Amino acid sequence: MLTMQLCVILLCLLLGTRYGGMGLGLISGIGLFVLCFVFGVQPGKPPIDVMLTILAVIGCAATLQTAGGLDVLMRAAERVLRKHPEHITLLAPITTWSLTVMCGTGHVAYTMFPIIYDIAINKGIRPERPMAVASVSAQIGVCASPVSVAAVSMVSMLAQAHGIGKAISIVDLLSVSIPATFFGVLCAGLWSMRRGKDLDKDPEFQAKLADPEQKAYIYDGGATLLDKVFSKESYRAVWFFFAAIAAVVVLGAFSELRPSFGVPGKLKPLSMNLVIQMVMLMAGAFILIFCKVKQQTIANSAVFKAGMVAIFSVFGVAWMTDSFFEAHYETLKASLSAVVVAYPWTYAIVLVVVSKLVNSQAAALAAVVPLGLSLGLEPKILLAFLPMCYGYFILPTYPSDLACINFDRSGTTRIGKYILNHSFIIPGAIGVGCGTLMSYTLVKIFM
């Protein structure tokens, strides 16, 4: 019965990936229905706390985007890149990683791709070098952002110690994930500096230049945000957003700043889930009121749409998998806990595989972290393997990777003949691998 139920879950995950994030969440509802009505599994609790926290963050970030704040950040990033074009292969991934850390979503990289391409091709640098690693780095930065869906979900799940080891706070997570993922991005960027043939030695590229139309297409561009004028409200929105991030970090670091509630003698500081929700809602409100945002346009922003898809994905996947784990807790613990605790890397393998299946870091964490906790892994070990939640670089099917390929008019960023030999797999493996090694080292030394 356990095997049959597990097959139902895997089938739903595989089928859901064909229909994107929304499909993943909705089709997980089919799996939950089958588990409940066919196999008699008692449904677990929907991840309401996680979903509400994600919703608050999305509301704030979407309001920021509508106010023009994201464009302000991206123009600042472009200035750095154009000031040092010879270092584009190293600066591009650092830039996209930084934007993701600040904004909470890797989708901010879309606007940067044509800019990175324009700088690289006019400097005579093979566009594949900065573009592929920039796309990968934007996704690596997701779990290092205090306002990303994945990081918020992780903190929510590890906020309690579950009777095993020390609870993980937002500050604990960021103190490990930020330096670890940055190290991974740096390693991937350094490797990318020498990848592929130089353009003047690439016969395929030189053959394209022989055709005047192809040459004009390759060098036609000039994409830039430098000539765009932003209102003072756009800058004000950025400061409101940064203030909110700072408030979350400070309140997470100093629990005594949070009000305490409970019976006398057993007072507990306000949950960080609720703190994040309050601060993000408040920041979004300030941006809405003081930055002249048209509230009806917020729901049409790219950040809002992507965030709502993520909520549906986490809702369905987490509810379905939590129901399964709760129903078979004792069996799984007896058969797997000894192996997983003795060889924690087996958890990491499961995490990266599930990430590829669901094409979402947040959904992968929602599915796998409860399993790790139920099997007796300490929260700090789960934190050590956090970078492994990005595994969808393995196949070039993620929207940002496909967009990156389309923006590279030189054709150097591509899907290989054998699918797996595409432009993103080696930078992704280096970034995630090195980031995980650094994360594991930091946890072992300092936690």
Image (cartoon, rainbow, N blue to C red):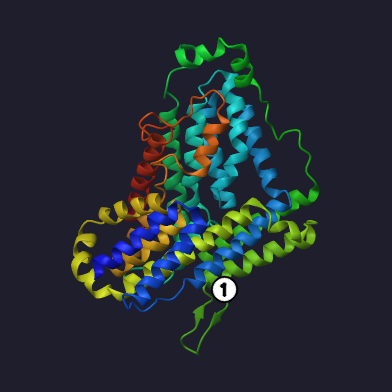
Q: Position of residue 270 (x, y in %)?
A: 54, 76
- Measured as percent of width and height from the top left, residue 431 is found at 40, 40
Residue 169, image x, y percentages: 46, 65
Image quarter where the N terminus lies is: bottom left
| Position of 415 relative to 370 (above/below) | above
Q: From the viewer's side, name the closer residue of 281 and 390.
A: 390
For the point 24% across and 75% down, the residue is 330
Secondary element at tag 1 = loop
Q: What residue is rendered at 47% in x and 49% in y?
A: 178
Q: Which residue is mark 1?
A: 258
In this view, which residue lies farthest toward the front? 38
Residue shown at 56%/50% (left/top)?
105
Q: Find residue 277 and report its horizontal and vertical position in percent.
A: 59, 68
Q: Is residue 403 above or below residue 321?
A: above
Which kind of residue does numbered mark 1 sit on?
Arg
Quadrant of the image containing the C terminus: bottom left
Could you say which quadrant of the image residue 304 lies in? bottom right
Q: Does any portion of residue 202 appear in the rendered image?
A: no
Q: Is residue 199 visible?
A: yes
Return the residue nearer the eye: 376 or 111.
111
